[in-house]
Image (cartoon, helix red, strand yellow):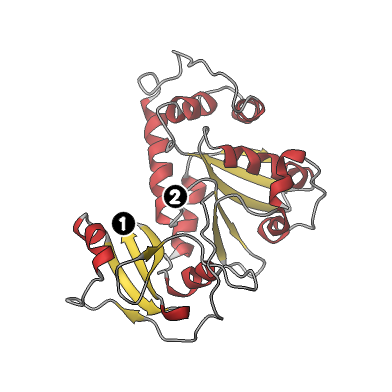
């Protein structure tokens, strides 16, 4: 989903996290963001003399890096000479984790569309999706073989990617057969779309409010972009994944054996 800036770094240095102390000096390159309301949560030493920073804006967190002189900001994925995504490691270690167990219980109360195994599913996952998100469409295509193998997917519509996201989501949720409407929307993804005047925010204010609440719930999981996947692993731990996963990740996400995914549109995610 995001452009990655590849920087060759030494191995990740072992170090303790230092919460950002009140009154501590912000490097010059971060001052504009701080003045705009971005909160510096903590800093940590990173490899090659870089300093890592956890920033927060609302419920969203991100990791960036500054050079020793504090004048240059590095954003994106830091990748070492062995191909390891060091930013992902830093996010796992340093970004505050929301209390997911209580939030997970709210998923069943959200407004979603069920697809896949209708009864006695082998596993269940929740996916936050925007109707205009191309990666959500690819996620839908990727899980079709897993749905055939016993997966139930609960698609949670949000409206974050433009003015047509809300009416498209309402059109699905207001349909007599929501699952069929979801599938029809995905099969026609990227094609011209005409709004249904009978299915708008004005005609369905309760659905519009429900979709807005879905977006708030997505933020509580710390999911910054769609698709956002939430599931329980085999130990019962709540896991969260932002963005389109690699196909190799689907068995651990779904809890099912690896399924053959031959869709050529997904070749870039192998």
- Tell whether 222 sits left or right of 78: left
Q: Residues within 10 Å of mark 1 (few under 14, many from 20)?
A: some
- Foreground of the two, 199 or 87: 87
Residue tagged 2: 218
Q: Position of residue 104 (x, y in %)?
A: 49, 57
Between disc 1 and disc 2, whose residue precedes? Answer: 1
9 in relation to 246, above or below:
below
Q: CA distance from mark 1 to mark 2?
A: 15 Å
Q: Are marks 1 and 2 in contact (CB under 8 Å)?
A: no
- Tell whether 28 sits left or right of 246: left
257 in relation to 148, above or below:
below
The answer to whether residue 161 of the structure is visible from this angle is: yes
Q: Residue furthest left?
A: 23
The residue at the point 49 percent across, 26 percent down is: 168
The answer to whether residue 118 of the structure is visible from this angle is: no
Q: Residues within 10 Å of mark 2 (few under 14, many from 20)?
A: many
Q: Secondary structure at mark 2?
A: helix
- Tell whether 42 sits left or right of 228: left
Give the numbered dot on residue 184. Answer: none
250 in relation to 263, above or below:
below
In the rendered picture of this protein, how many numbered marks are placed on residues?
Answer: 2
Q: Position of residue 202 (x, y in %)?
A: 35, 20
- Foreground of the two, 207 or 140: 140
The residue at the point 40 percent across, 27 percent down is: 163
- Foreground of the two, 256 or 33: 33
Q: Secondary structure at mark 1?
A: strand
- Tell whether 124 sits left or right of 263: left
16 in relation to 150, above or below:
below
Residue tagged 1: 57
């Amino acid at each position: 989903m995001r452009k990655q800036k590849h920087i060759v770094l030494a191995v990740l240095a072992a170090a303790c996290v230092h919460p950002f102390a009140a009154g501590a000096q912000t490097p010059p390159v971060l001052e504009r963001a701080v003045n705009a309301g971005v909160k510096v949560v903590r800093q940590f030493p990173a490899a090659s003399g870089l300093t890592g920073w956890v920033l927060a804006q609302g419920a969203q967190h991100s990791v960036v890096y500054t050079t020793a002189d504090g004048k240059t900001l590095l954003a994106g994925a830091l990748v070492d000479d062995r191909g390891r995504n060091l930013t992902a490691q830093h996010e796992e270690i340093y970004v505050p984790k929301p209390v997911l167990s209580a939030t997970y219980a709210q998923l069943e109360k959200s407004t979603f569309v069920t697809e896949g195994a209708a009864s006695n599913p082998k596993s269940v996952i929740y996916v936050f999706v925007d109707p205009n998100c191309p990666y959500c469409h690819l996620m839908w295509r990727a899980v079709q073989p897993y749905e055939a193998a016993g997966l139930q997917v609960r698609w949670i519509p949000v409206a974050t990617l433009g003015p047509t996201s809300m009416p498209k989501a309402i059109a699905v949720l207001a349909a007599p057969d929501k699952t069929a409407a979801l599938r029809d929307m995905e099969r026609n993804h990227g094609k011209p779309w005409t709004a249904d005047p009978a299915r708008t925010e004005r005609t369905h204010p309760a659905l519009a409010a429900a979709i807005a609440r879905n977006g708030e719930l997505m933020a509580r999981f710390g999911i910054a972009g769609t698709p956002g996947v939430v599931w329980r692993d085999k130990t019962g731990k709540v896991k969260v994944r932002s963005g389109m996963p690699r196909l190799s990740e689907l068995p651990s996400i779904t809890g099912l054996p690896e399924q053959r995914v031959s869709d050529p549109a997904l070749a870039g995610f192998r």
